[in-house]
Amino acid sequence: MSAKPKPARNPDDIDDHSAPLIEHLVELRTRLIWSVVAFLVAMVLCYTVWNPIYNFLTRPICSALEVRGQECGLILLKLQEGFFVAIQISFLGGFMLAFPIIAFQLWRFVAPGLYRREKDAFLPFLIASPVMFFLGAAFAYYVILPMAYTFFLGFQQGPLALPGEAVTETATGPMAGIVFQGSVLEYLSLTTKFILAFGISFQLPVALTLMGKAGLVSAEGMISVRRYAILGILVLAAVVTPPDVISQIVLFVVIYGLYEISIQLVKRIEKQREAELRAQGLWVEDEE
């Protein structure tokens, strides 16, 4: 059963605020200026402490190297690479630090054009989005990255012979060592890709629930395409994670669990909508 007509909006629920186009553009410029200022200030603050942030981001690779008895060290391939590492860390840290202020400025710009009921519906999603992103980033940092780097470092062999030392011999002759000597910039790029990918993946319940609130998706429709969702999650797990079964299974279980949670959240929204429409006498039963 479904609801055919939508309840009429009460004009009293609309904010008494109207402005010509030029005032909206001025308001948009103001919000953008505040957002840019917040980002630049946060970026400068992160630049002053980029070394501790770098040390935090390199813990997964250092832990994986320590298990193998190897010294943790990344190299600079270019003279200016150290500066760009600091800028990259400052850029990412500044965006994450300024994100609440940027989201607030977005809310201040959009809110006057929304109905009060739409505000009440949209605000929880605005709060949940950064929370889920940070949960996904934490999951990538503490769970996926250690497994990924352990897998990647497993392709080493050696060690390489140092000058003046004998080359390692095998039954078939000298062995060419393979030892990790990673670039700082490449390591940070790979690490941030993992963190961003999982942070975005954890937006799945927020996006689907918001679409359910807007009537774009239904719980029944999500259940009907469940097999395709499973296939898509399997492909995502194979692409994002390294080709070891454990990390792929972990990612699949987490994202599929988020999909099932999204179905339950959409069901709850549909029940609330049905209860409201029944109370208003606007609920229409489907005739079979």
Image (spheres, rainbow, N blue to C red):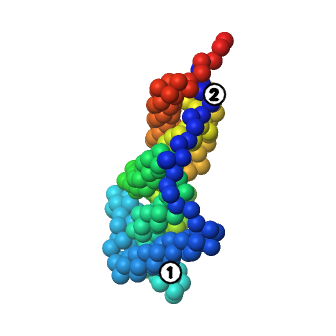
Label 1 crowd (10 A; few <14 / some 14-19 / many >=20)? few
Say which quarter of the image contains residue 93. bottom left
Q: Quadrant of the C terminus?
A: top right
Question: Which numbered circle lies on residue 84?
Answer: 1
Residue drawn where x is 58% and y is 66% of the image: 19
Which residue lies under the disc numbered 2? 4
Residue drawn where x is 60% and y is 24% of the image: 2
Up-down: is 243 above or below 272? below
Under tag 2, what secondary structure? loop
Up-down: is 186 above or below 218? below
Q: Nearer the viewer, residue 282 or 130?
A: 282
Residue 103 point in image, percent of width and height = 46, 62
Outermost residue, bottom direction?
A: 79
Instruction: Please state if 235 lies on the left or on the right of 16 as rendered.
Output: right
Under tag 1, what secondary structure? helix
Observer-side mark, 2 or 1, equals: 2
